[in-house]
Amino acid sequence: GNSVTQMEGPVTLSEEAFLTINCTYTATGYPSLFWYVQYPGEGLQLLLKATKADDKGSNKGFEATYRKETTSFHLEKGSVQVSDSAVYFCALSVQTGANNLFFGTGTRLTVIP
Amino acid sequence: NAGVTQTPKFQVLKTGQSMTLQCAQDMNHNSMYWYRQDPGMGLRLIYYSASEGTTDKGEVPNGYNVSRLNKREFSLRLESAAPSQTSVYFCASIRQGITGELFFGEGSRLTVL
């Protein structure tokens, strides 16, 4: 089946620290991979995506590389800011159009000044 | 730029009461979704509508009904609310042919006493 496993939280970092949130997946086909971010009191929004192996998605200083050999899509940022405090969800999709995204359980990140 | 709008944002119900969550999108998207978000469980799909006039069950449809009123609107109804339905509900929509890039509403927090 299709599933996503991501790093348990919560994660607390000091400002300017390096961030890694691990995500691994199981998929029956050739998935597209996504990271969504949920800021406090808001809905989820797409942070970045990668649609095929070895693609690197990037946005707002975050990046993640689609690793087919390790079935992983780890999220990284070199220097986090207080404004990055949010819940991060890894997700995969194996269909186009009216698809279903399979979400991880989310990882809460808190960045302290 | 409204995007996806959900109402109400907060609701408290007693066990056995009914209510409808409303969702509307102004992006001319074909497909719409209802998810619930529970601590430690990520997002789970309740129902989705691939296009106007069609609806399909997701992972956790029991206790819910939906109506795709037109292309813009997709409502979720709880006929007889139960405490297990206490959750945060998110409506989302997607552009046709774009895999996984969902646009989410801000969420509706429902408490069933």
Image (spheres, coloured by chain):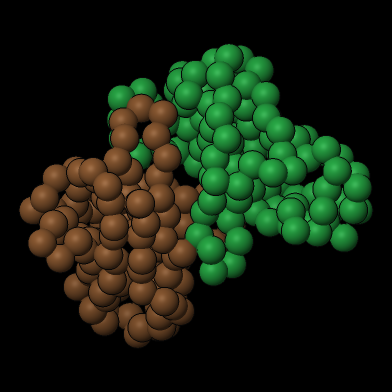
Chain colours: A brown, B green
Q: Nearer the viewer, residue B30 or A86?
A: B30
Task: Identify the residue shown where x is 61% and y is 61%.
Answer: B38
Which residue is located at x 30 percent, y 72 percent?
A21
Total label count? 0
Residue A26 horizontal/vertical position (percent): 29, 57
* Location of residue A82 with respect to B74 vertically, above or below: below
Q: Quadrant of residue A3?
A: bottom left
Q: Is residue B1 visible?
A: no
Residue A43 in view of the camera: yes
Q: Which residue is located at x 44 percent, y 65 percent? A: A106
**Nearer-the-camera pick, A91 or B91:** A91
Question: Residue at left 27%, top 65%?
Answer: A24
In the picture, which quadrant includes the C terminus of chain A? bottom left
Considering only vertical position in the picture, is B40 above or below A30? below
| Residue B83 as seen in the image, left or right of residue A96 | right
- Residue B4 location in percent, x, y? 54, 34
Snapshot quadrant of residue A93: top left
Q: Position of residue A36 (x, y in %)?
A: 38, 53
> For this view, does B89 lie left or right of residue A112?
right
Above or below: residue A68 compared with residue B93? below
- Above or below, A88 against B102 in this view is below
| Whole-percent x, y for residue B84 in the image | 75, 58
